[in-house]
Image (cartoon, rainbow, N blue to C red):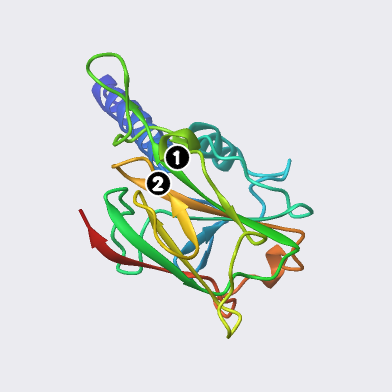
Amino acid sequence: MRSPFIAIAIGIIACLMGIGSAYLVLDGNLRFGKVDLGQWDVWPLAGEPTADPYTKAYLARSGTVWMTVTEGLSLATESDSDGKPLLGSCTYELSGQVPRGRLWTLAPQGKARSNSAGGISDVGDGVWDSDLAGDTFISSSDIVWNEDETLTIMISRVAKPGNWLRLSTPGRFRLMLRIYDTPLTSGALDSAIRTPLITRRNCA
């Protein structure tokens, strides 16, 4: 007969493993169905009713609205070309090409958490919120294109000449690139698709 202590230990271990796996999923460290396109993450099926429950839970916690395949694609990134977190105190250059689509938008989102005073801090580890990063966006119809049909967008808190996306958060942020009415589907996503590069230029 098994010792009751062994049974209790097994139960505790199972609970800890379940809690740990749930935390990894909700914290974004484990993402089912995610496709990497350069610096960008894509969940082509995240907006579908058939998305797995872990993906739905993560998106609900992060405050992300993901498009369905028929609507388009949502791409997200939280880091620059060197793998460093995007910070509102820095200036970035987004350059290159955007996957084909009828229209696209680029918007920053800040990350919020409750502070000790009961308010909201914009340098936390909570849900993403577009209001914390300036509630601004830039679209394909706003862009002045380069002669070689590539684009260059400066991303910073301070105004820049040319294409500029304004930030208001001094803390971490991520970029959401939404491409509408694109011919790309979940079965056509691979590393050969060109996506824009985000390079850190300087920091305050």
The foreground one among 3 and 159 is 159
**Cα–Cα gap, marks 2 and 1:** 5 Å
- Where does residue 120 sit, x and y in percent of width and height? 34, 23
Which label sits on residue 125?
Answer: none
Neighbour tally class for label 1: few under 14, some 14-19, many 20 plus, Cα within 10 Å:
some
Asked if disc 2 and disc 1 are in contact, CB closer than 8 Å, the reply is yes
Q: Quadrant of residue 111?
A: top left
18 and 183: which is toward the camera: 183
Residue situated furthest front in the rendering: 161
Q: Residue at coordinates 73% horizontally, 40% vertically from top-left?
A: 49
Q: Where does residue 163 sit, x and y in percent of width and height?
A: 50, 63
Name the residue that disc number 1 marks.
134
For the point 36% across and 62% down, the residue is 92
Q: Secondary structure at mark 2?
A: loop
How many C-alpha atoms fall within 10 Å of the one at disc 2: few (<14), some, or many (≥20)?
many
Residue occupying the point 26% across, 22% down: 115
Left of 120 or right of it: where is 109?
A: right
Dot 1: element: loop
Q: Is residue 121 visible?
A: yes
Measured as percent of width and height from the top left, residue 64 is found at 55, 40
Residue at which label 2 appears: 167
**32 sits left or right of 13 in the view:** right
